[in-house]
Image (cartoon, rainbow, N blue to C red):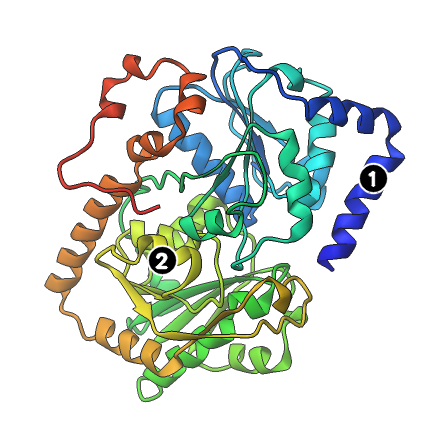
């Protein structure tokens, strides 16, 4: 499937003779660029992970006072996923860097759309790519020639591109904002008995094998088989009918509550905040936004201690699950064994961690949540994100000296991304 995507993309370029010439010229980048505010392009109105990622970028730059312009590529590339309203943004100044947060299979189409409105040849072009296995697909190298920098959300992804192409690659992470405290909006509706409530999520349109919601459910049911008031909420995007029979059987268990209706980002935040913990037994992640955002809200998070999630394992409320590496077997065909192994999480260990979390006192829970919030503020707020950006791209945005706090390191803080 990966090769078919590659050939499909090249066929698209071949069919568009004028676009092919234009993109060829785009690969010959100038030596100097103008300074200006950033333009952030991506799936701003989409519920997928790349959509959440680009919204985090926007909010981070806005918090820094850089007033980024925004271009939503969802209507042009994935119109069926244009579900969120995009808030108005500043007008593009025609000068600053363009940050494109989509992955290579759709880059040529995206650049074709952007070049109708912007002079791409004269703008500093930055790609932010996410990937989930130790090696990125070989055909991704082809697309690096159109960019001046490639950013990644974690050191794990950065290493997947190591030594692959001439374009410099930087690990910049995401700005992870404070999004309010724990919420009780959903609590009475979803678990009126008031028992321990966990949260997990899965997108049926992604690789279900990689996301591994079945592992999360098995761990939860093993941990709380004797506790009928305990519940796990499973937020599902896409059609449940696409799941394997073994997973559908688990979803019908009495302790499992399926939430498959559309939720806005704020509703999703409230749903997570109504729970006692989150569990994510992925087999591979480029970053892992759902566990990261749950941890940022103060929830204890049980997560496979491998791949992109390793970026925040030192956070006090992250409980890393033991694993062993195994050969990739993906029935959906998104991932292949040629790109490296992935993790098989230890279900027994995950169940033990869930029981430990459920046994914590209210006082201990509050103290843990406070330490976690402090950790995220020191390591992943907008200011820490700014300090991680490459010097050249920072120099092409408004002068950092106008925002002196951005360049100050907080005592004891460190970058883990």
Relative to 151, does residue 288 appear above or below in the rendering? Answer: below
Relative to 292, does residue 278 appear above or below in the rendering? Answer: below
**Direction from residue 402 to residue 2 in the image, left or right:** right
**Direction from residue 263 to residue 103 in the image, left or right:** right
Location of residue 219 in the rendering, given as x and y in whole percent from the top left corner: 39, 79
* Residue holding disc 1: 12
In this view, the residue in front, 331 or 198, is 331
Disc ID at residue 319: none
Q: Residue furthest left?
A: 363
Please give the name of the residue rendered at 37% of the width and 85% of the height, measured from the top-left corner: 222
Location of residue 15 in the rendering, given as x and y in whole percent from the top left corner: 89, 36
Please give the name of the residue rendered at 35% of the width and 74% of the height, measured from the top-left corner: 322
Where residue 278 sits, quadrant-wise, is bottom left
Location of residue 259 in the rendering, given as x and y in whole percent from the top left corner: 51, 63
Residue 81 seen in render: no
Relative to 160, does residue 73 appear above or below in the rendering? Answer: above
Residue 280 seen in render: yes
In this view, the residue in front, 306 or 331, is 306
* Residue holding disc 2: 310
Please give the name of the residue rendered at 78% of the width and 55% of the height, measured from the top-left corner: 4
Relative to 195, does residue 6 appear above or below in the rendering? Answer: above
Mark 2 secondary-structure assignment: helix
């Amino acid at each position: 499937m990966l090769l078919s995507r590659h050939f499909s993309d090249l066929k698209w370029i071949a069919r568009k003779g004028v676009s092919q010439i234009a993109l060829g010229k785009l690969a010959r980048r100038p030596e100097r660029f103008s300074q200006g505010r950033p333009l952030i392009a991506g799936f701003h109105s989409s519920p997928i992970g790349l959509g959440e990622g680009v919204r985090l970028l926007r909010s981070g730059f806005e918090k820094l006072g850089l007033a980024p312009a925004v271009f939503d590529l969802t209507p042009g590339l994935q119109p069926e996923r244009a579900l969120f309203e995009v808030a108005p943004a500043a007008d593009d100044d025609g000068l600053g860097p363009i940050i494109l947060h989509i992955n290579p299979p759709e880059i040529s189409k995206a650049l074709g759309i952007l070049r109708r409105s912007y002079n791409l040849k004269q703008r500093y072009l930055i790609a932010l790519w996410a990937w989930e296995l130790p090696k990125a697909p070989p055909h991704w190298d082809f697309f690096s020639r159109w960019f001046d920098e490639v950013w990644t959300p974690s050191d794990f992804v950065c290493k997947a591109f190591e030594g692959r192409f001439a374009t410099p690659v930087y690990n910049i992470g995401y700005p992870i904002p404070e999004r309010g405290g724990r919420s009780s909006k959903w609590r009475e509706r979803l678990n009126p008995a008031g028992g321990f409530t966990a949260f997990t999520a899965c997108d049926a349109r992604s690789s279900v094998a990689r996301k591994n919601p079945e592992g999360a459910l098995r761990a939860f049911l093993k941990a709380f088989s004797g506790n009928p008031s305990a519940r796990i909420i499973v937020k599902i995007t896409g059609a449940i009918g696409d799941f394997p029979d073994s997973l559908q059987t688990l979803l019908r268990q009495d302790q499992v509550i399926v939430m498959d209706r559309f939720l806005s980002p704020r509703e999703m935040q409230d749903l997570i905040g109504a729970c006692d913990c989150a569990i994510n037994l992925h087999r591979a992640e480029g970053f892992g936004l759902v566990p990261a955002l749950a941890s940022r809200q103060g929830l204890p998070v049980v997560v496979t201690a491998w791949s992109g999630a390793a970026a925040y394992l030192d956070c006090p409320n992250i409980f890393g699950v033991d694993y062993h590496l195994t050969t990739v077997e993906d029935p959906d065909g998104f991932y292949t064994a040629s790109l490296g192994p992935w993790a098989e999480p230890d279900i027994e260990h995950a169940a033990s961690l869930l029981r430990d979390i459920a046994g914590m006192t209210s006082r201990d829970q509050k103290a843990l949540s406070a330490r976690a919030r402090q950790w995220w503020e020191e390591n992943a707020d907008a200011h820490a994100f700014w300090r991680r950006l490459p010097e050249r791209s920072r120099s092409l945005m408004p002068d950092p000296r106008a925002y002196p706090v951005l360049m100050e390191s907080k005592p004891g803080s460190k970058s883990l991304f």
